[in-house]
Image: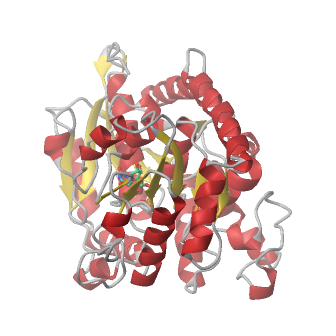
Amino acid sequence: VQQEEPANCDGRARRVLLFPLPFQGHINPMLQLADVLHGRGLAVTILHTGFNALDPALHPEFTFVPVPDGIPADVAASGSIISIILAMNAAMEASGAVRDVLASVLADDGQPPAACLFIDANLLAVQKAAAALGLPTLVLRTGSAACFSCFLAYPMLHENGYLPPKEAELYTPVKQLPPLRVRDLFLSSSNNHEMVRKVLARATETVRNSSGLVINTFDALETAELERIRGELDVAVVLAAGPLHMLSARSTGSTLLSEDRSCIEWLDAQATGSVLYVSFGSLASMDAGELSEVAWGLANSGQPFLWVVRRDLVRGSQHGSDLPEGFDRAVEGRGKVIRWAPQQEVLAHPAVGGFWTHNGWNSTLESIAQGLPMICRPQFADQMMNTRYVEAAWGIGFELEGELERGKIEKAIRKLMEEKQGEVMREKAKELKEKVVSCLGSGGSSLLAVDKLIDHILSLHG
Ligand code: UDP
């Protein structure tokens, strides 16, 4: 993205504030959006929590302002995202700290006037604090349009008896939200259903209280889902401005873990389209037995692979996710294991031919943007839903369901990388990539959405 003429109104430059939810999959798209807005001449201030704090040194072009999050240490250590979201909002509402920080940011005369605040949908407390100060908010949804449409449909899903989910009905189609089945619904497998319901209702409220919604998707990918949202929401703008990582000038720079770049050199030495990239994102985990099955499945498949094994990938491990004995020797020269990857660069590398993913929305969209077919292994949140779309709506991958077992894994890898079925998925993935290219080109839907967004921001008083 080129730095353009400053976006201003009446000759005055404007500033936007952005506040991501402090998790990798939410931070990345928010900072990509910041980058896009900065590229259009807006000054950018990022608010961030102490929990998973951002490193201002990585983004000298932005101003950073820390906000006390008040997350109790035991909740932070629990790793439960839902508990962290609720605790953070409760603490922020109780302390008034966000309001104080926002008030001092708005009073800073050294900066252009703030037009609005972009927030994650999970930050209702921040939306309320901004509203009390007369500062308009816009929400960035970091999941798919289908996912937010499902948030909106949650009361209907209860009224119609789909939720809470019943074991015998997991494969029942949700006829109001094709192609979803009960098991694909947001966190339907969770046992803390009431907490989920509360979090989703609060996220919907945050959006309804805001002046606009930006979704990290593109029109051609989720046409019907976007239409559904536009039909149900009464906010000034609902814009599909993704994939944001393709619009943003930087591909890296906001990761909480340090990237192992040695994998790029390793990929350079591999044949085109030969490598399976394996990563389960920043939060998903497995037990030691599953790790061992994945390791031997990869080894026995005979395919080259690049596998991200985060230090905390194995639940409760004292040793930092150790691989089974003999594995290194078995895959020497053909497999590489790293702790954290420069993922967007990896997926864009010509040697990579497929992605075994947990289907977090960012990973799914990053894969689509590179035309790569997927093996899907969803665990929680919107991952089941994303998997369903990959398989049944777009035909660019398939789910590896049930117990993780080495023989099954080996077969799935061969299916994706060597067999006819995988070839068909690869073709479809390439067709979808063309659509990504069009939405980002001149007159493309996502570029037009960014234009509209800038107009909207400038129409807000500041
Ligand atoms: N990611 C990365 N390196 C890795 C694994 C993941 O940079 O080794 C990035 C990935 O590109 C994506 C984000 O982390 O932007 C993960 O977000 P996603 O929504 O896919 O999953 P989550 O981590 O939220 O479950």
What residue sits 28% from the left and 38% below the top?
265
**Total marks in image:** 0
What residue sits 25% from the left and 73% below the top?
70
User: Position of 102 compared to 425: left or right?
Assistant: left
Point out residue 249 in the picture as x, y percentages from the top left corner. 35, 28
Judge whether residue 261 can be spotted in this image.
no
Of residues 342 and 220, the one drawn nearer to the viewer in this rendering = 342
Image quadrant where one finds the N terminus: top left
Relative to residue 144, is residue 382 depicted above or below? below
Which quadrant of the view contains residue 412? bottom right
User: Position of 314 compared to 167: left or right?
Assistant: left
User: Position of 414 compared to 370: left or right?
Assistant: right
What residue sits 60% from the left and 21% below the top?
444
Point out residue 396 in the picture as x, y percentages from the top left corner. 67, 47
Relative to residue 400, is residue 8 depicted above or below? above
Of residues 87 and 330, the one drawn nearer to the viewer in this rendering = 330
Image quadrant where one finds the C terminus: top left
Point out residue 191 in the picture as x, y percentages from the top left corner. 57, 86
Of residues 8 and 352, the one drawn nearer to the viewer in this rendering = 352
Point out residue 255 in the picture as x, y percentages from the top left corner. 28, 51
